Image: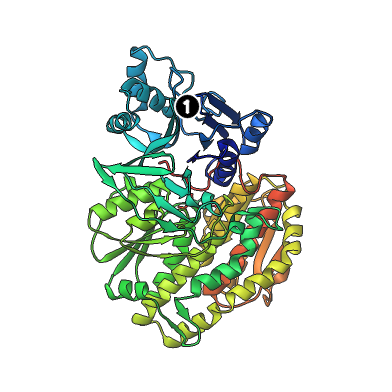
Amino acid sequence: MCGIFGFTGKQDAAPLLLKGLSRLEYRGYDSAGICVVNGNNNFYIGKAVGKVMELRNRTEGVDLAGYTTGIGHTRWATHGGVTTNNCHPHTSSDGRFAVVHNGIIENYSELRTMLQNEGYIFYGETDTEVAAKLFEHLFDEDDFETLKKLTTVIEGAYALVFIDRENPNRLFGAKLGSPLVIGIKGDSCYVSSDYRSLIGTVEEYITLEDGDIFCIENGDYRIVNCEVELVRDKESITEKEQAMELGDFPHFMLKEIHEQGEVLRNVFAGRVDFQEKTIRNNTLDEIVAQGFERIHIIASGTSYHAGYLGKQYLEHLADLPTEVTVSTEFKYGKQFIDRKTLYIFVSQSGETADSLESMKIVNERGGYTFGIVNVPGSSISRLAKSGLFTHAGVEVGVASTKAFTAQIATFLILALAFGQKKDLEYTRFLSILEDMEKIPDRIETLLKTSDRIREVAEKYARYPNFFYLGRSYELPIAMEGSLKLKELTYRHSEAYSSGELKHGSLALIDADFPSIIINGSSPLHGKNCSSVQEVKSRGGKMIGIIASNDQKKDIYDDYLTFEASLPETEVFSEVVILQLFAYHMANALGRDIDKPRNLAKSVTVE
Ligand code: AGP
């Protein structure tokens, strides 16, 4: 996905665009560019391969005073290589229009051929350049009317924002499938892919809906959808500016790892009453009352791993058969949609195209959709029939951390809510609920052992491959730990059920292929110890993620410990250790922690 930012008003646009783009960089950081226009109808276009800082350096020293309208873009390449020619904004052949785009124009190839036959010459390979030249081709003296025509021709998902050098106080565009918001404060008007880039700039914003076509000029805006003029509700921005700042931390990821104790307190608030020792929440009461007989969880990446742990919770604590499917497979698989199944969509961003498109299918076929989402106002949260926000706050680091722990806490609460209405033994319900209250403090204590985790991470930084092993509740934690290592260190790793290794993959084990096993206080602790021996006896190194009271510490080459508690709750400590393990190894390897290569924070294209 990509980040779009636009401004029109009385101030010079370039500094505002660069600030907005730096806050959207998590959406993609292959290249960045801006196009600004002044009152004499002159464009300035600056582009740079690499991060927004490269663009800032490129525009340094250029006199852009009086250029008070502009658009900016930070790119995650979908069509066309990472080159200056493919960097947005893209322009019409006559140089009058410029456009930035987030999404994919599915029929861009046919349109490009049609335009080439009409004599248009292309300088790049992107679908967005097709939109620029198509607008020029359709232009009939009215920007807004031309835009309406354009949206009847292009197919796919898009958030498009145009500027017209002949109308230098105007921004206009269209939204279908990719997010776009408008923020206005006095005579300053902003357009952005994410309202959070406007934190500290405006107090309210408007979320555009699919099919909206908009025009902003001189502090006012117009929105049309299906030929109907609309006034959309404004939403307030509640996050404070420091949410988007690093503070005393070297990286957003480390800041967000350290926020997890507070995040979990927020997740529990308003849902878990630790005094009354009960789960109390209207949404949960309504969902449980529906009498669902099965659960189907659909998600991608880290959110899929949260869903996989959610399956363990829902089956063990609420006796609900639960299926988990990656979004990319769900949409193109055979779907059996029925009214006795609750379809849970898990997404930090709420914009992941694979999950969003899968949810649309379930909605269209009458299934009951439930969102576990972090970003308020996001597409998945708006389309779900019901849901719970994870309240993890803004997560800037591309590698998800606090959003994951917030997601699994939400699943634990959901499972207990279903469980207390089914036949979950009250003593077990109570013991888990009472232990949940200790999780935030436990995490904050664990964070103080970060130096020990760093020591072990640096010791193993030279190895190219790793197994992450676990069973039952701890297999999804192994999966999440493995993904963190891959995302951050670019080292290969594979999560595996520790019991399964002997059925073939054990062949990979040698002195240069270490394994990490998550082996807490679960009933499978002994079985996991056997798996450790299988690896050790073949010369494999073994790192144990184990409870501090584990009596078998000596079977490991190295181990990292957490406070023993319950299988259902030790997973929170285990994943924090693995987050820090990956973080410290990546740091030792000199990786870009918050913007790992090739990735983006949320993938809004299929
Ligand atoms: C996890 O660290 C990655 N950022 C990625 O796997 C992410 O979890 C996945 O793309 C799903 O994103 P979502 O939660 O916003 O839907």
Residue 109: horizontal and vertical position, in percent? 36, 24
Residue 330: horizontal and vertical position, in percent? 35, 50
| Nearest the eye: 35 or 133 | 35
The residue at the point 28 percent across, 76 percent down is 289
**Colour approach in the figure:** rainbow
Seen in the image, is 531 located left or right of residue 1? right
Q: Residues within 10 Å of mark 1 (few under 14, many from 20)?
A: many
Q: Would you name the residue on which mark 1 appears?
A: 90
Is residue 472 in sight in this rendering? no
Residue 547: horizontal and vertical position, in percent? 65, 73
Figure disc tally: 1
The residue at the point 32 percent across, 27 percent down is 142
**Residue 128 sits above or below residue 236 on the image:** above
Q: Quadrant location of the C terminus?
A: top left
| Nearest the eye: 277 or 98 | 98
Seen in the image, is 193 located left or right of residue 329? right
Is residue 509 in sight in this rendering? yes
**Residue 433 sits above or below residue 152 on the image:** below
Distance from mark 1 CB to nearest ligand 1 atom below 8 Å: no
Residue 559: horizontal and vertical position, in percent? 71, 65
| Nearest the eye: 533 or 471 | 471
Based on the displayed image, in which of its 4 quarters is residue 44 positioned? top right
Helix or strand or loop: what does disc 1 sit on? strand
Seen in the image, is 149 located left or right of residue 171? left
Seen in the image, is 442 located left or right of residue 500? right
Amino acid residing under circle 1: His
The residue at the point 63 percent across, 70 percent down is 443
